[in-house]
């Protein structure tokens, strides 16, 4: 009877060991699957983050290039506007000069006209003032 009890005990221990070994293998397999699943999920997220980072860097470079291009264009427009402004000022100066010359020419023409009228009548003309009144005959 003792030998039978020992034999049963040994069989139970072997059964428990086999069961424990099986449970250990299943636990290792489950932990491995969970680890792989977590690693895959994390790798997907990390890959997504890296992809997004590359896209952001690409957009930043493109934005920087566009900013430089627009800055250069703006400087060209400012230079062109300054040139236009200078040309406009010069035109204003020329217009003012032309108006002064035109006024002087009118004054000269009027003076010549007065002189001519005085000599046409056969009488000399003497100019006593620079007003625009008719010339006085002496």
Image: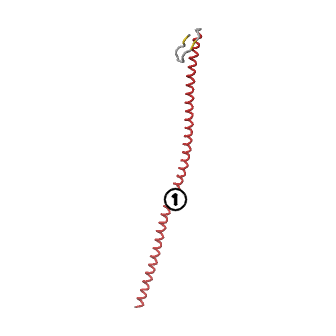
> Residue 101 location in percent, x, y?
57, 24
Q: Say few, some or many: other residues with alpha carbon within 10 Å of mark 1 (under 14 / 14 to 19 / 20 or more).
A: few
Residue 106's place in the image compared with 92, above or below, is: above
Which type of secondary structure does the marked residue at label 1 adopt? helix
Return the x and y of residue 123 as percentages of the image width and height.
Answer: 58, 9
Number of numbered discs: 1
Image coordinates for residue 53, horizontal then vertical, percent: 51, 57
Quarter of the figure with residue 104: top right
Colouring chosen for the image of the structure: secondary structure
**Residue shown at the point (55%, 40%) measured from the top left:** 78
User: Height in image: 49 above or below 22?
Assistant: above
User: What residue is shown with label 1?
Assistant: 50
Residue 120 or 46: which is nearer the viewer?
120
Image quarter where the C terminus lies is top right
Rendered residue at 47%/66% (across/down): 38
Which quadrant, please, contains the N terminus? bottom left
Vertical order, 116 against 46 (above or below): above
Position of 18 compared to 87: left or right? Answer: left
Question: Who's the residue at 55% across and 33% down the image?
Answer: 89
Q: Is residue 16 above or below residue 31?
A: below
> 16 or 83: nearer the eye?
83
Percent x, y of residue 63:
53, 49
* Of residues 89 and 100, the one drawn nearer to the viewer in this rendering: 100
């Amino acid at each position: 009877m003792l030998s039978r009890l020992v034999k049963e005990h040994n069989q139970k221990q072997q059964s428990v060991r086999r069961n424990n070994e099986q449970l250990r293998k299943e636990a290792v397999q489950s932990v491995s699957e969970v680890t792989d699943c977590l690693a895959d999920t994390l790798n997907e997220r990390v890959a997504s983050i890296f992809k997004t980072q590359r896209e952001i860097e690409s957009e930043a470079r493109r934005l920087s290039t566009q900013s430089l291009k627009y800055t250069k264009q703006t400087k060209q427009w400012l230079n062109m506007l300054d040139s236009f402004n200078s040309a406009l000022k010069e035109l204003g100066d020329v217009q003012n000069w032309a108006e002064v010359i035109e006024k002087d020419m009118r004054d000269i023409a009027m003076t010549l006209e007065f002189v001519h009228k005085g000599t046409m009548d056969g009488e000399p003309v003497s100019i006593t003032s620079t007003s625009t009144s008719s010339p006085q005959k002496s």
